[in-house]
Amino acid sequence: MNCISCIDYIIIGIMVLSAVFAVEWRDLLAAVVGMAAVSLFASLLFFFLQAPDVAMTEAAIGAALSGAVFIFAIKRTRRFETEEEEKPGWWVRW
Amino acid sequence: MVSILKRSLAIITILIIGYWLAVAMSHIPFGQDKMLVGQYYLNHVKDQTGAVNAVTAIVVNYRGFDTLGEVTVLFIASTGVGALLWKRKRERTARVPGSVVLTTGTRFLFPFIVLFGAYIFIHGHLTPGGGFPGGATIATGFLLLYMAFTVYEIPHKGFEVTEGLVGMSYVAVGLIGLLIGSYFLYDWIWQTWHVGTVGKLFSGGFIPIIYILIGLKVGTELSGIIDNMLKEGVSGND
């Protein structure tokens, strides 16, 4: 089995997983960490796809700066998402 | 009941749009060599621009006007953040000082981060990178300073003056090209004098100059955005 492509698939899997977590977590600080993880693994993927300049930009802006901006916003507002009034089942929320 | 109806309607709409997009994408021949313009750039990039890195040669030289627009967009974004968060008197309100590990690590790492950012944008025509990644890297260094020290602020006067001067110099470089050559952002250094040898640091026409300008501009602007986001208005004094 070609191992370079299997690394690619593992990274894509982690990206999808952290994206789902970033949407689902009620703790917004944890959600920001999930979003930054998506950017970090995207930058790794860009590096493996031979685009190092895009990887550098993604790591600096996506992982560091935008995460910091979100954390500043959370610091000024509230940390936890409020519960919705009506809770439909998981099949509708997905 | 209404909510479930609404959500299922949204899901059905998304499925229909997704199906259309998938059908449209399936007709695009990805990975096939059909790009005539790209091949032209790859064949002529060395003798037309003097740069080894074809990506930055396209971004700065062939499509320099677009890059000027991008810099303008960033400037407008920074101005918007400043205008939205404007207060007469604003200060840093952080109370918890950074831990020993954070402050010591920041003192040790900050010069290297700035050096690496400067390396990225000075060598933009030789190695991957350019003004935008280099400037963003420098801004992360300033973000680290803001995190570690509760009283730290960027030197506002110097940063604002640098930002304005650098933006004007980009337009000035383009106008000199208009004067010497025939069009705005004409590569006057490479096309008229052929300064330097291809592959060395002193080559690439005006690409290194413009990328140094862009790197300084992006670094100062993103640091200014961080500063604007972090400081809070002090009420009660005015």
Image (cartoon, rainbow, N blue to C red):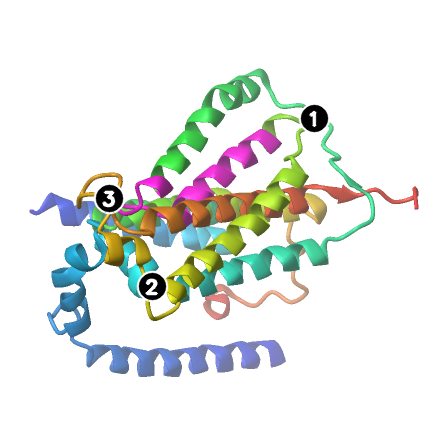
Q: Which stretch did the figure color magenta?
A: B121-146
Q: Is residue B141 magenta?
A: yes
> Compared to B140, does B193 lie above or below?
below
Query: Which residue has dot 3 on it?
Result: B126
Q: Would residue B228 be found to the left or right of residue A26 on screen?
A: right
| Residue at image location 54% in from the left, 22% down from the top | B102
Between disc 1 and disc 2, the foreground one is: 2
Query: Which residue has dot 1 on it?
Result: B96
Query: Which residue has dot 2 on it?
Result: B186
**Of callouts 3 and 1, which one flags the residue occurring earlier in the amino acid sequence?**
1
In the image, B184 versus B127, the foreground residue is B184
Image quadrant where one finds the C terminus of chain A: bottom left
Q: Position of residue A83 (x, y in %)?
A: 66, 57
Whole-angstrom CA distance, mark 3 to mark 1, is 43 Å
Between disc 3 and disc 1, the foreground one is: 3
Q: Residues within 10 Å of mark 2 (few under 14, many from 20)?
A: many
Q: Which labelled disc corresponds to residue A42?
A: none
Tell me the quarter of the picture where residue B89 sits: top right
In the image, A1 versus B176, the foreground residue is B176
| Residue at image location 66% in from the left, 39% down from the top | B156
